[in-house]
Amino acid sequence: SLAVLLANPTPALPPIIVGMNATAAPGAAAGAGTPASFVVSLSGDRRTAVARPLVNVTLEPDRVLELWAAAGSNPPRSLGLISASGATVVNRTTLPPGTDHLAVSLEPPGGSPTGAPPGPVLYVGKLTS
């Protein structure tokens, strides 16, 4: 006998590209040039993010960058530490339901000790899809 299994797969979600604009240039005086910006690509299943600065970001040796996801006025959730000078792949990143923006903050080594971004938020980008 022959059995035929028909599957109706769930349509794949398209990837999302989030442009993140600088809120302040770290260590730069007002008007001291163009602040760096980040681009974050989210996979269709929203489980992998790739963060990349468009221009290298100069950090003090005792500071790191941390990527955050937030939904409305809910507390942000850390997606992990990211590089100031190259692409960073953040795996197993399930975004909180309703995530509408991403942010990058300046933190002490190891990232935020509180689970919230106590450092200044340097870059912010809205999810448009």
Image (cartoon, rainbow, N blue to C red):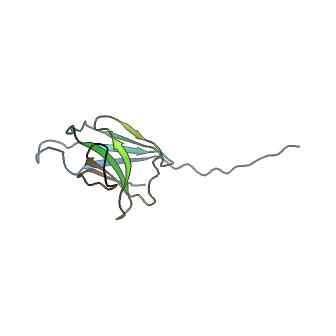
> Does residue 95 appear left or right of residue 76 in this picture?
right
To which quarter of the image does residue 51 belong? top left
Instruction: Please provide percent x and percent y for residue 54.
Output: 29, 38
> Residue extending furthest front?
113
Side of 50 relative to 103 (left or right): right
Nearer to us in this view, 16 or 72: 72
- Residue at figure coordinates x 61%, y 52% from the top left: 10
> Residue at coordinates 34% horizontally, 48% vertically from top-left?
67
Quarter of the picture holding the C terminus: bottom left
Please identify the quarter of the rendering in which residue 2 is found: top right
Q: Is residue 12 left or right of residue 33?
A: right
Residue 69: percent from left, percent from top: 37, 54
Residue 1 shows in this picture? yes
Determine which quarter of the picture holds residue 1: top right
Q: Nearer the viewer, residue 128 or 67?
A: 67
Residue 37 visible in the shown view: no
Label total for image: 0
Residue 73 location (% of width, % of height): 34, 65
Residue pushed farthest bottom? Answer: 73
In this view of the protein, which residue sits in the foreground, 40 or 107?
107
Q: Residue at x 76, y 47 (%)?
A: 5
Going by the picture, which residue comes out furthest to the right?
1
Would you place residue 101 above or below residue 41 in this image?
below
Q: Position of residue 124 (x, y in %)?
A: 29, 52
